[in-house]
Image (spheres, rainbow, N blue to C red):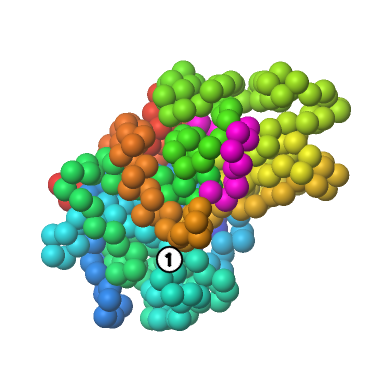
Amino acid sequence: MQALVFERKPARYAAAAVASRVVPGAGGGVGPLRRLDIDPPEVPGPGWHTVRPRLTGICGSDLATVEGRSSRYFEPLVSFPFVPGHEVVGLDETGRRVALEPVLGPAARDEPLPFPGAAPGDGLDYGYLLGGAIDDGIQIGFCASTGGGWGEALVAHQSQLHEVPDDLSDEAAVMLEPAAGGVHAALKAHVQPGASVAVLGAGTMGLCSVAAVRALTEAGTVLITAKYPHQRDLADSLGADIVVEPREARRAVRRFCGCRMLGDYLSGGVDVTIDAVGSPTSVADAIAITRPRGRIVLLGMPEAARLDLTGLWHRETEMVGAYTYGTETLPGDQTATSFAMAFDLVVSAELHRLVSARYPLERYREAITHAAEAGARGAVKVVFEQNP
């Protein structure tokens, strides 16, 4: 089968990092990613299924990997060579259309669940990531045994597959994974009724977060930073009240909150900030614009960086990570998985409209460049289209 394969080649990885700093997406051409003819992944055992992707997204973590920007933290949590791609809608061996929940949880590795009915992302001890009948890997798309969505076939455990109803388009279904991430971030933010929320970044995850905050919380004012006109229009339609350019974030929050400046920080700020970028600049902005004893949710995958956390300490700000999705606690002690809740969100917020461009695998260099330049080119989500 044809697949895009990421190999362990440090010299090419370094070259990708250099090239991508000059031209966004250039790492897809000079890095360790290659289109190859490989054997399909073998089914590891009972409970596993073969899935042939129809649409697969290119997400920020994929770009960070291809462009040589990913943190070394992940080195023990992947196995090489792997086929990237974890935002997937495809067909299993019976012809059933399924969406992939890519986290390789305890069930996929023959480990006991941390609690009955736990979702794949609910692990309380990540030691299971190195066990089971498959190679090391944090998700499908970063595991040598499973393949990934940037190939013509992958294997997934039954705990990772969600049947897609007939009335949900492929474009909507491929948005389920990022929408679930937005749901998880919105609920980890612990937004109180009437609270002010800032979202940094209006790419896929920032827009999904705004949609989730509006659908699932009783937030008051929602502010988002958006660099491009189409992002501003989408953010407004998804429920943002204030939309500003990233460089205006501190000034806009100061004006909205009526607070003062304390050097580079605001004396007050919003109650909650969701950082959907994960850059050193966005993390610094999040600390600066969140009120003392407020809450920051890191949704965008952070880069390795040197940060001054004095403000976080002095303001007693809570900062939590929001990695993928899991089981959410809802009012009335009810629970639901963020992935299941994403089905409603993609319909109510019409998130299928974020899918902006499709490419076949053989045009992967163009696709990766387009995804890296998505905002500047009027796009949001770029996908690979396979197995029509």
Tell me the SS state at disc 1: loop
Image coordinates of residue 56 in percent, x first then y, are 31, 48
Image quadrant where one finds the N terminus: bottom left
Q: Position of residue 79 (x, y in %)?
A: 46, 68
Residue found 53% across the figure and 44% down from its top = 186
**Residue 223: x and y, percent?**
58, 27
User: Residue under circle 1?
Assistant: 119
Answer left or right for 117 relative to 53: right
Residue 270 visible in the shown view: yes
Q: Which residues are magenta?
A: 187-203
Above or below residue 201? Residue 385 is below
Q: Residue at x 53, y 23 (%)?
A: 241
**Count the marks: how many?**
1
Can residue 67 be seen in the rendering of this structure? no
Residue 252 sits inside the magenta stretch: no
Left or right: where 178 falls relative to 12: left
Main secondary structure found in the magenta portion: loop
Q: Nearer the viewer, residue 104 or 274?
A: 274
Residue 241 versus residue 191 in the image, above or below: above
Q: Which residue corresponds to the image point at 37% horizontal and 42% vertical from the top-left?
A: 345
